[in-house]
Image (cartoon, rainbow, N blue to C red):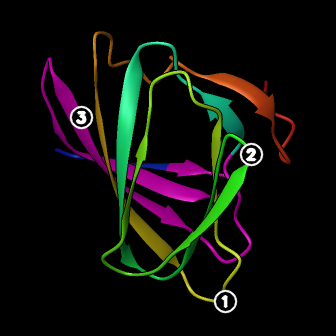
Amino acid sequence: MKSIVNKPWGSFEVLEQDKKYTIKKIIVIPGGILSYQSHSHRSEHWIVVEGKAEITLENKVYNLSENETIFIPQESKHRLANKSDKNLVIIEMWYGDKLDENDIIRYDDIYGRK
């Protein structure tokens, strides 16, 4: 059974997981901001399925709407934010040599996580 994991910025649910990939549904509440982070062992591909996303990738900001996508290369600093008044829903796909939720380096986090 799939379980929803609550976070300060919203929640996520693992939809499918294999040795070579992981697919997650991420819901970011209005005003929610994920940490500015990178991953040593995986790349990510994000698809906006509902709402509007503000994505920081390295030092560039992208504003994506429904049905738009972005590729997050391994070791790239990135952040996802919902600046709208409605939930943001993202489908996130991971792939790489080590698919682990703990593969995260946080550079900045408004919730004080390290």
Q: Disc 3 and disc 2: Cα gap in Å?
A: 26 Å
Please say if 84 is above or below 114: below
Residue name at image x 32 percent, y 19 percent: 99
Please count the marks in the image.
Answer: 3
> Foreground: 21 or 111?
21
Please say if 10 is above or below 15: below
Mark seen at residue 59 = 2
Q: In this image, 107 relative to 54: left or right?
A: right
Of pointers 3 and 2, the one earlier in the residue sequence: 3
- Report helix, strand or loop for mark 2: loop
Residue found farthest to the front: 60
Q: In this image, 5 relative to 23: left or right?
A: right
What span is in magenta? 6-34
Can residue 14 be found in the magenta stretch?
A: yes
Neighbour tally class for label 3: few under 14, some 14-19, many 20 plus, Cα within 10 Å: some
Residue type for callout 3 = Thr
| Residue labelled with disc 3 | 22
Residue type for callout 1 = Asp
Give x and y (percent) for residue 103. Answer: 51, 17
Secondary structure, magenta segment, majority class: strand
Neighbour tally class for label 1: few under 14, some 14-19, many 20 plus, Cα within 10 Å: few
